[in-house]
Image: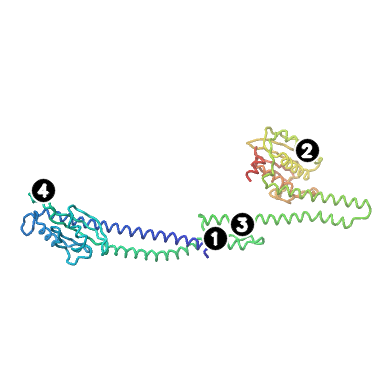
Amino acid sequence: MLGEARARILVWYLLLMSLSSLVSVLVVRQILLVRLEERIEQTLTQEIEEFRQLRNGRDPATGQPFRDDVEAIFDVFLSRNIPEDSEYLLAIVDGQFYKASSLALPLGIRPDDRLVQHWSQLTQAEHGQVNTANGLVLYRADPVLLRYQFDAPAPAVGGVFVVAHFTAREQAGVTEAVLTVAQVSVVVLLIASWLAWFAAGRVLAPLRLLSQTARSISDSNLTERIPLKGSTGDIAELTLTFNDMMDRLEATFNSQRQLLNDVGHELRTPITIIRGHLELMGTTSQEQNDTLDIVLDELDRISRFIDELMLLAKAERPDFLFPETLDLTVFTEELFAKITALADRRWRLGALGAGVFVGDRQRLTEAMVNLAQNATQHTEATDTITLGSSQRQGQVHLWISDSGEGIHPADQGRIFERFVRGQSRYASSDGSGLGLAIVRAIAQAHGGQVTLLSQPGQGAMFTLVLPLVPSRSTNDESHSDS
């Protein structure tokens, strides 16, 4: 189960949430302790300030200034001030414990304790914190100087006023609050984890559906698709990518099935002819030679058919083209010299383009010869077949036009597909139906296209439209890219 994406997401979520909750609790605890210490320090400071103001005031019993009557100052202050919980006010006179705000002092600040003895010897104000048996205590001590002894060489210390605050109770409250926060965080984490498990399941549902769909796909069932929910986001993009991939796979499988069917159909006829003539081959030399000629002719047709299939397969490879710089005028004249030997027609050289372009001489020659051969199959001896070329708008145009029967509109959109032969009033040729498919493959390999203009009874014109430099510029570059 831990191997599932849903479980891994939840584990990481729990780890991150637990770590953040732990850090949050520790930070909250530290903040509360700091604020507690600041509040206690403010209270201690306030008590010291009030004590100093009283020293500079008057005795309410006599209406006269306190002067150096330290005991009277302590008596009035302790009688008028009620300390907070865990806070204690101590008065030390002439180095001896005099009075406190509470009769029951905790351990650590009782008259005989070491800390009180330390306070009794102070000559300067002091504040700090000390760990005692009852916990941490924060204190401020303020010595009372005798300012009216004129015969003394320096002011003497008549007493010490101490404000002490034990933090154990407040710290216990902070700890309780932090524990409460921790408990709430645990409960929230459990609820959030359940919600995260549920949410992760909803988010990852398309992935599970993807897995189920992938398992249900076979070579006999390529129609399964994932329903698209939403138009944006990673899941939607993954769904679209998967469905597009399945569309391509289905098209490829269908194309392969169609190819196998077409190949089987195309090969069945010559194989049947070969088998029939071999089975009926006569015993005389003439009969055997006639049968042998027929068999060899059919084998040649099978060989041409296989060569054409191999050529179409190579058209998808990066090393299909071997481009070179060609002179358009010279190349057109070379083509015309080659195609005029294909059949007895009225051959005519039309416009001659000027300039140079980059292309594979052998492949382009093969494409144009196929177009010329196709023209001879749909014309008579009295028809005219024209070859021409031009260069305009950064493109090279090479065309073959004829004055034959033309191509039916229903066939014009499909004659470039494999094994498709257009309707013709002339006798069927022994072609494989791959010639125009090869022409289109060669044009596309150069980054161009082949176009057709035709009307029934008015001839046809096939044009190779090529860029000046093919998309596959050099054989070496194609290999390096691949």
Q: Earlier in the sequence, mark 2 or mark 3?
A: 3
CB atoms at circles 1 and 2 under 8 Å apart?
no
Q: Quadrant of residue 319?
A: top right
Q: Earlier in the sequence, mark 3 or mark 4?
A: 4
Tell me whether the residue at label 4 lies in contact with that at label 1, contact meaning CB atoms closer than 8 angstroms.
no
- Numbered tag placed on residue 246 in the rendering: 3
Alpha carbon separation for disc pair 2 and 4: 134 Å
Q: CA distance from mark 2 to mark 3?
A: 45 Å
Residue 220 coordinates in the image, percent (x, y): 67, 62
Q: Are marks 2 and 4 in contact (CB under 8 Å)?
A: no
Identified by mark 1, the residue type is Leu
Q: Which residue is mark 4?
A: 153
- The residue singled out by tag 1 in the image is 207
Give the crowd class for mark 4: few <14, some 14-19, many >=20 residues within 10 Å. Answer: few
Q: Nearer the viewer, mark 2 or mark 3?
A: 3
Q: Earlier in the sequence, mark 2 or mark 4?
A: 4
Snapshot quadrant of residue 450? top right
- Secondary structure, mark 3, is helix
* Nearest the eye: 45 or 188: 45
The residue indicated by pointer 2 is: 338
Label 2: which secondary element = helix
Q: Label 4: state its secondary structure.
A: loop
Circle 3 or circle 4, nearest the eye: 4
